[in-house]
Amino acid sequence: MKYDPASEIQDHQVFGEFGGVNPSITDSSTFTFMKPDTMKELFENEIEGCFLYSRHWNPSNKYLAEALAKLEDTESAQVTSSGISAIACTILQICQNGDKIISSRTIYGGTWALFKNVLPRFGIKVKFVDILNLEKVKSEITDSTKMIFCETISNPLLDISDIPELGAIAKNNNLKLVVDNTFSPMVVSPYKLGADVVIHSMTKYINGASDCVAGCICASNEFINELTDINSGMTMLLGPVLDSFRSSSILKNLNTLHIRMKHHSNNAKFLASKLSDDGYKIFYPGLKSHPQYNLITNIMNTEFGYSGMFGIDVGSLDMAEKLLENMQLEKIGYLAVSLGYYKTLFSLPGSSTSSEIPEEEQEKMGLSDGIIRFSVGLDNDIERTYKRIIKCLDKIK
């Protein structure tokens, strides 16, 4: 194993103010000072153990951020109210009017829409490329380029970004490599492979209960301090504050992430392998037939598997829609977006989580309307789940 995030989180101790094994929840937006000079100093410099206002920091968010830094082996972290706010704040901290971003073409639809429709309003240009083509990435670098953006495991086609090579390209050109690791917490540790910033939608696997929306940014002390700077920090000034009660619940759930990721991954590999053997077109990085199987096997933390996501192409939109309806009726899971939930979730990415992307761009990505995305749950009897899926597939033939 290259890195053991589970053990790092296990060894991370947080003592509650009254000795509780769970730290107290900060139910306060503002904090008192005994002396005016201390308040004045905190507006100018960070003071360990002192808090000013919850939009800046509060103890509950700090506890969670410290644990997330252990997850990704970064110096520091910041929590936000959503994954997309984490991405937006990171970009606006690094880029300004006239700058350029090189982004993977195969990314979450919400991120694609932010890049395509919103960032140009701020004078920030985005060039979408095949991130697997490293020479193409290099050829797009100009004097105005400031960032390379990719997802470790792409949404929804499960391509694998070569983070070590992309990190080297970024470093050689004085760029920042920003990686969305939402699909693969614990599975891959991008910061150790050369990423400068690692982002998660904690809504998904990290929280694991589909009961909140949250995000995080893991990076160096320097970058997190820039984000939280009172005068120019994007998380401070744009205010994507995560509620303290949610920070507390996510911190608790983080301690079971290693167990959940192993089970999600094992179940997904079982289903992907069986369905592939049955002749179906399957997208799963844990199959040797996957184009980047050797890459992810080389960069992953092997104990946690290949993630709990897979895709199946059933050939047409009509067949896909019928299959989705049948699977929900057979109690395989839920027809719903998102991922990382206890139970299996399935959806048509082309008309849901990637619907912001125009059809011509979806075609360039290789996203057909017959592809179904699965977030495989924590099913105890995955053989039973497989049999139910086969029953549903037989119905649409």
Image (tube, rainbow, N blue to C red):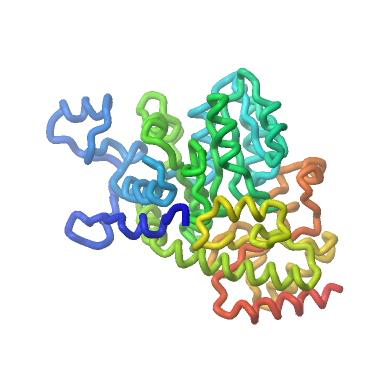
Report the quarter where the C terminus lies.
bottom right
**Placement of 181 over or under 344, stated as above or below:** above
Q: Position of residue 82 (x, y in %)?
A: 50, 46
Q: Residue at x 76, y 58 (%)?
A: 371
Q: Residue at x 51, y 27 (%)?
A: 94
Q: Nearer the viewer, residue 306 or 123?
A: 306
33 displayed left or right of 362: left
21 displayed left or right of 159: left
Q: Nearer the viewer, residue 177 or 112?
A: 177
Q: Residue at x 47, y 57 (%)?
A: 1
Q: Position of residue 307 (x, y in %)?
A: 58, 60
Q: Residue at x 78, y 48 (%)?
A: 366
Q: Quadrant of residue 105?
A: top right
380 displayed left or right of 62: right
Q: Position of residue 202 (x, y in %)?
A: 49, 52
Q: Position of residue 319 (x, y in %)?
A: 83, 66
Asked whether residue 164 appears in the rendered view, the answer is: yes
Q: Nearer the viewer, residue 152 or 387?
A: 152
Q: Quadrant of residue 48?
A: top left
**Placement of 261 over or under 102, stated as above or below:** below
In the displayed orientation, state which residue is furthest to the left.
Answer: 34
**Placement of 305 over or under 222, stated as above or below:** below
Asked whether residue 156 appears in the rendered view, the answer is: no
**Placement of 333 over or under 348, stated as above or below:** below
